[in-house]
Amino acid sequence: MNKTEMADEALFLLLHNEMVSGLYRAAEHGEGENGRCITKLENMGFRVGQGLIERFTKDTARFKDELDIMKFICKDFWNTVFKKQIDNLRTNHQGIYVLQDNKFRLLTQMSVGKQYLEHAPKYLAFTCGLIRGGLSNLGIKSIVTAEVSVMPACKFQVMIQKM
């Protein structure tokens, strides 16, 4: 990784942390409801995901199917955004996909283990929106949730909404 890539990654991590803490700080000072912070972060991620997918797929061939799209998200999309591929992709072939990242970049700055586990959802909301927005621009409506049992590993569950 060269110095420019390291600077880009550091800026992304700092920006993400500041978005999270800024929204929660505003909520504590009465400028918004605390419960709405996760929704705001998820909506920000959704919009960013839409834009990134549009940019990343402009020169790619059409995808064959849903699984092909999910593989693209796990390999190319994840690699561009988080500098690594998803560690594991599982599916039940009925519209549910589980993406596992054993060393998720946005959680590695926090303590390893269970010490800050209750804070994990606010650091995953943006990424849930990122995935949902990317899939949306590829014609897939979905619900994305995240689960952490031991940091910095996390699982994103994508449930495809049939139209």
Image (cartoon, helix red, strand yellow):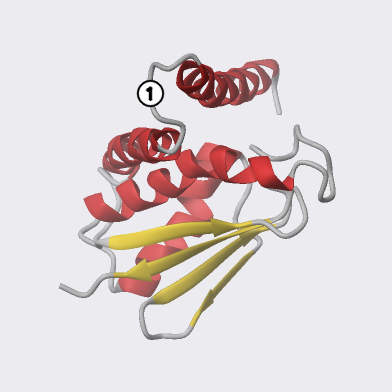
Sort mark 1 into few (<14), some (14-19) or many (20+) by Cα contacts within 10 Å.
Answer: some
Residue 88 percent location from the top left of the image: 63, 67
Q: Residue furthest front?
A: 30
Left or right side of 91 for 118: right
Left or right side of 100 for 50: left
Residue at 59% in and 24% down: 17
Residue at 66% in and 61% down: 87
Residue 75, compared with residue 8, is above or below; it is: below
Residue 88, compared with residue 41, is above or below; it is: below
Residue 144 percent location from the top left of the image: 41, 58
Q: Nearer the viewer, residue 108 or 113?
A: 113
Residue at 68% in and 45% down: 118
Residue 24 percent location from the top left of the image: 52, 24
Q: Nearer the viewer, residue 32 or 91?
A: 32
Residue 34, compared with residue 143, is above or below; it is: above
Amino acid type for the residue under numbered disc 1: Gly
Left or right side of 152 for 60: left
Residue 76 percent location from the top left of the image: 48, 50
Q: Secondary structure at mark 1?
A: loop
Q: Nearer the viewer, residue 38 or 157?
A: 38
Left or right side of 18 for 119: right
Tell me the quadrant of the picture where the C terminus can be found: bottom left
Residue 86: quadrant of the picture: bottom right
Residue receiving disc 1: 32
Tell me the quadrant of the picture where the N terminus can be found: top right
